[in-house]
Image (cartoon, rainbow, N blue to C red):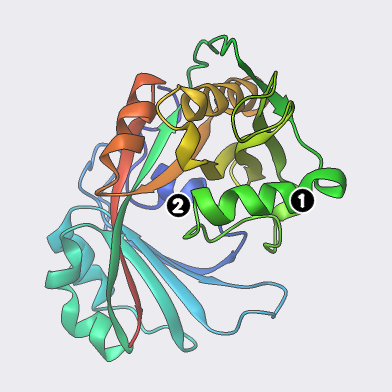
């Protein structure tokens, strides 16, 4: 992989971000390009002013992340922090002083390799149009992935290229052309594509639909931007197996802290 060797402030988690926030300030303890454990911290703000406060993101060896965070004084209220997993307990005094508590653990996965897109036979991966398909996508995600932070009503929904899986013929309980899976691919800062809002209706799981949908969006993303990213909760083993088969690897293990 060609874009994943950076450390500290050059780590892919910092250079390719999915939040569309602006870097306000940054800190690092790096001693040079070979310092693989270097800590890097960035303070982010919303350039539109719609979301007040700051977000802090940190990468690096956990002890070094905690030590570097202790030197940071954010310029506004901190509304969230993402740090290398294992750093939170070491940085708890700092994060707690900012009014944060542990929330979730998740992984950022990446790939620069286009996977093979399988033929689904009874179904097909197709492009979707928010002007035409928004209600249908929303209905699928409400059942298939209700915890998604994105979706067709999200702030950046129209930045994304939406795709889905439709049935080629009718069957028990569904019609020809029924949408049974959906997902989005959004160009993000750093010259990459981020996949999100991926979900398959429970009745249609186990048929390879999510894998084919993700493969199609990944292949298109690699062709257009060279790098594709996605995030998943650390305990989502079923999704992890799908993504690993498609060539994704973990770039950063994360814990998120949110306001108390």
Q: In front: mark 1 or mark 2?
A: 1
Q: Nearer the viewer, residue 220 or 175?
A: 175
The picture quadrant where one finds residue 243 is top left
**Quarter in which the C terminus is drawn:** bottom left
Report crowding for label 2: few under 14, some 14 to 19, many 20 or more residues within 10 A (C-alpha). Answer: many
Please give the name of the residue rendered at 72% of the width and 74% of the height, measured from the top-left corner: 48
Cα distance in 3D space between marks 1 and 2: 31 Å
In percent of width and height, residue 192 lies at 59, 37
Q: As displayed, is residue 60 above or below residue 56?
A: above
SS at badge 2:
helix
In percent of width and height, residue 30 lies at 28, 52
Q: As displayed, is residue 137 above or below residue 225?
A: below
Nearer the N terminus, badge 1 or badge 2?
Answer: 2
Quick one: which residue is furthest to the front in this view?
Answer: 172
- Residue 195 at least partly seen: yes
SS at badge 1:
helix
Please give the name of the residue rendered at 27% of the width and 57% of the height, measured from the top-left corner: 39
Instruction: Name the residue carrying label 1.
Output: 134
Q: Nearer the viewer, residue 69 or 155?
A: 155
Report crowding for label 1: few under 14, some 14 to 19, many 20 or more residues within 10 A (C-alpha). Answer: some
Q: As displayed, is residue 232 above or below residue 96?
A: above
- Residue 17 at least partly seen: no
Instruction: Name the residue carrying label 2.
Output: 14
In percent of width and height, residue 123 lies at 62, 19
């Amino acid at each position: 992989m060609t874009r994943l060797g950076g450390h500290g402030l050059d780590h892919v988690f910092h250079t390719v971000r999915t939040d569309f926030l602006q870097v306000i300030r940054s800190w690092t303890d790096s001693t040079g390009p070979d310092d693989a454990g270097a800590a890097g911290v960035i303070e982010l703000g919303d350039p539109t002013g719609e979301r007040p406060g700051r977000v802090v993101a940190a990468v690096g060896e956990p002890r070094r992340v905690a030590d570097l965070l202790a030197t940071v004084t954010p310029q506004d209220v901190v509304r969230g922090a993402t740090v290398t997993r294992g750093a939170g307990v070491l940085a708890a005094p700092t994060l707690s002083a900012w009014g944060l508590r542990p929330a979730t653990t998740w992984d950022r996965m990446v790939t620069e390799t286009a996977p093979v897109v399988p033929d689904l036979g009874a179904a097909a991966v197709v492009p979707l149009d928010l002007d035409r398909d928004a209600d249908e996508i929303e209905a699928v995600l409400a059942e298939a992935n209700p915890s998604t932070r994105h979706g067709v009503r999200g702030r950046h929904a129209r930045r994304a290229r939406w795709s889905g899986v439709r049935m080629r013929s009718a069957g028990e309980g569904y019609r020809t052309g029924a949408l049974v899976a959906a997902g989005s691919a959004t160009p993000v800062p750093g010259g990459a594509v981020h996949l999100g809002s991926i979900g398959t209706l429970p009745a249609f799981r186990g048929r390879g639909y999510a894998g084919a949908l993700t493969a199609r969006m990944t292949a298109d993303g690699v062709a257009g931007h060279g790098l594709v990213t996605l995030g998943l909760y650390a305990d989502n083993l079923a999704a992890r197996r799908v993504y690993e088969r498609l060539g994704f690897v973990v770039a950063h293990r994360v814990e998120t802290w949110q306001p108390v």
